[in-house]
Image: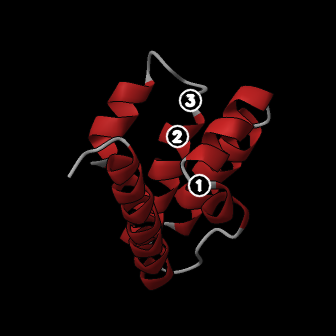
Amino acid sequence: FIAWVEMAQVPYPTNPYMSLFLALAYQIKGDGRRAEEYRSKAVEFSQTDYWRQRFADFKLVDILENFPQTAQETFDSIGALQEEIGQSYMEYQKSKGGQ
């Protein structure tokens, strides 16, 4: 995952999504130095109104502002995010007449 995202990031070096998810991946891997490096980039690159809104839309602000400090906290944060977004998606589908 890390190698793929780092390669995909080459043409988009200031994409804060990629930086955030690389930070999370490095935290899971146990490389706190690299996790912090990418977390800092995610913070820096997400300062525009556009990216602030995108992070809010996808419920990523909390992870960015309260970055997990261990692999387990990272898994917990991702799990909570998955649950929250899954519920939002199901509600959206119901409102559009989906299943």
Nearest the viewer among 62 and 44 is 62
Q: CA distance from mark 2 to mark 3?
A: 6 Å
Q: Secondary structure at mark 3?
A: loop
Q: Residue at x 59, y 78 (%)?
A: 69
Mark 1 vs 2, N-terminal side:
2
Circles 3, 1 touching at the beta carbon (< 8 Å): no
State which mark lies toward you, 1 or 2.
Answer: 1
Q: Residue at x 20, y 52 (%)?
A: 99
Give neighbour class at mark 1: few <14, some 14-19, many 20+ (Cα, 10 Å).
Answer: some
Q: Residue at x 50, y 81 (%)?
A: 73
Q: Name the residue type under label 2.
A: Tyr
Q: CA distance from mark 3 to mark 1?
A: 14 Å
Residue 65 position, x and y percent, is 73, 62
In the rendered image, the residue lying farthest to the top is: 11
Q: CA distance from mark 1 to mark 2?
A: 9 Å
Nearest the viewer among 82 and 4 is 82
Circles 1, 2 touching at the beta carbon (< 8 Å): yes
Mark 3 vs 1, N-terminal side:
3
Image mark count: 3
Q: Residue at x 62, y 37 (%)?
A: 54
Q: Quadrant of residue 49?
A: top right
Q: Name the residue type under label 3.
A: Asn
What residue is disc 1 on? 60
What residue is disc 3 on? 15
Give neighbour class at mark 3: few <14, some 14-19, many 20+ (Cα, 10 Å).
Answer: some
Q: Is residue 32 above or below residue 47?
A: below
Q: Is residue 6 above or below residue 39?
A: above
Nearest the viewer among 57 and 39 is 57
Nearest the viewer among 93 and 80 is 93
Which disc is residue 17 wearing? 2
